[in-house]
Amino acid sequence: MKTKTETPAAMLEPAGMRAAKIIGVGSAGVSLLEVMNRGEFTGAGFAAVNTDATSLAGSTVALKIHLETRLLRGLGTGGDPERGRAIAEEQFTTLKTACEGADVIFIVAGLGGGAGSGITPVLARAARETGALVLAFVTLPFVCEGNRRQQQAQQSLEQLRAVADGVICLPCQKTFKLIDENTSVLDTFRITGELLVQGVRGVWRLLTRPGLIQIHFDDLCALVRNRHSESAFASVEASGPARSREVVEKLLNHPLLEEGRVLAESEAVLVSMMGGRDLTMAEVNRVMEQINRHCERAQVIMGAAVDEAMKTRLSVTLIAARQNPDAKTEAQSGAPASVECADMSASRSAGRRQVAAVSGESAPQSGLSLEQREQVLARHNSGRARKAMARMRQAQLPLAIISKGRFDKSEPTIHKGEDLDIPTYIRRGVALN
């Protein structure tokens, strides 16, 4: 485990403002831009991208990008991500131009629909081509929204992971842990939006807020760039004499961190602490000691800042970057995957040797010894034998015919000694598949 902090001489070094743009995609993304407190993101450029002209008309951001073609006829994508992707590819240059001049691009969107799912991965790729650090903040639909939206969201998420530097994903279903039976639909979506905005705000503070322990833009780039990871985040706050212990308890019980399990699986963790002038070094050390204990395998980057407006409050924003799920699967499979590949390779080699023996050609040499090849073939054959034994067999049930109903007194139809009233497959013992 590595904890990265600045040297004492650099603690008071200014942040060095970086050019940033926050782009909302689709109806959900445009709505999220509207709930952001623009004062908290002073210096950032805002842009709204959508295929729905009505959604853009209600937006207050300065830059509005209406992706339109003759095919859509102003009606949007109709919930089809392929339409969204096609129009984004068609106007790729427009998207790339909108991203130019920024060091970091924040993309906010809701996945599952046509515009958000289709445009977001293309926009992320366009932003990457400008050289910017691309961080995507997205939501996944509720289960009750149906399988179609769930599948579209997952496909878009995989595409987004492949091109963005970091993806912070909020499954809306997790917000059920934060609401009760009386929470309305509007309040539920508002809570979900606020959670996603908290993630953007947390990273923004890491990059721009001058602090006693400063996190630099280069540190963040080195941590997430080219990792294509999926991240989880949480933002908690507490006040009073026991606030350091309380924020740790809230983090470890936070539903978006899966009650702390995410921390144990993370490979990189960013922590932003903010308090008033009464923030003590003992409190900072106490919080970080507990976080480090739960992130033993992760590289931890921590920043601390003093804000007079916080007064007696202590705020902690944590972003945990998980390993790429595909790479994680490969790493976990490790030796078994290699053995399976060796088994398949040995089987193919054995088949080639048999063909070569028949044709008189020389068999290719294998990297395995004779004993190893025999062991591999034995495992392969035993596996096939077990599969054959496990195959279900059809058997006849010992059922006796009690009555033939109105044909009970009729004579059976006998032909060449066989009762034709009995089905052929039963008379001949044919098993039905």
Image (cartoon, grey):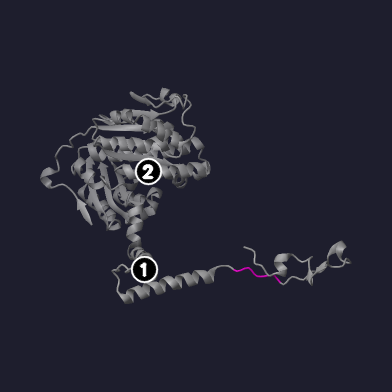
Residue at the extreme left: 9
Please identify the dominant SS of the magenta region.
loop
**Amino acid type of the residue tagged 1 in the rendering:** Ala
**Amino acid type of the residue tagged 2 in the rendering:** Gln
- How many angstroms separate mark 2 from mark 1 (CA)? 44 Å
Q: Is residue 69 above or below residue 123?
A: above
Q: Quadrant of the C terminus?
A: bottom right
Is residue 104 among what the camera can see?
yes
Q: State which quadrant residue 235 falls in.
A: top left
User: Regarding mark 2 in the picture, which secondary structure is present there?
Assistant: helix
| Residue nearest the observer in this picture, 272 or 400 | 400
Find residue 346 and report its horizontal and vertical position in percent: 36, 68
Q: Quadrant of the N terminus?
A: bottom left
Q: Is residue 394 magenta?
A: yes
Residue that mark 1 sits on: 356
Find residue 54 and report its horizontal and vertical position in percent: 45, 24
| Residue nearest the observer in this picture, 368 or 211 | 368
The mark nearer the N terminus, 2 or 1, is 2
Find residue 156 and report its horizontal and vertical position in percent: 41, 42
Residue that mark 2 sits on: 159
Q: State which quadrant residue 10 falls in.
A: top left
Dot 2 crowding, Cα within 10 Å, few <14, some 14–19, many 20+: some
Q: State which quadrant residue 362 falls in.
A: bottom left
Picture residue at 20% right of the left edge, 49% below the top: 281
Find residue 179 and report its horizontal and vertical position in percent: 47, 44
Q: Is residue 68 magenta?
A: no
| Residue nearest the observer in this picture, 290 or 268 | 268
Q: Is residue 298 above or below residue 66?
A: below
Q: Which residues are magenta?
A: 393-397
Q: Left of 156 or right of it: where is 223?
A: left
Is residue 236 among what the camera can see?
no
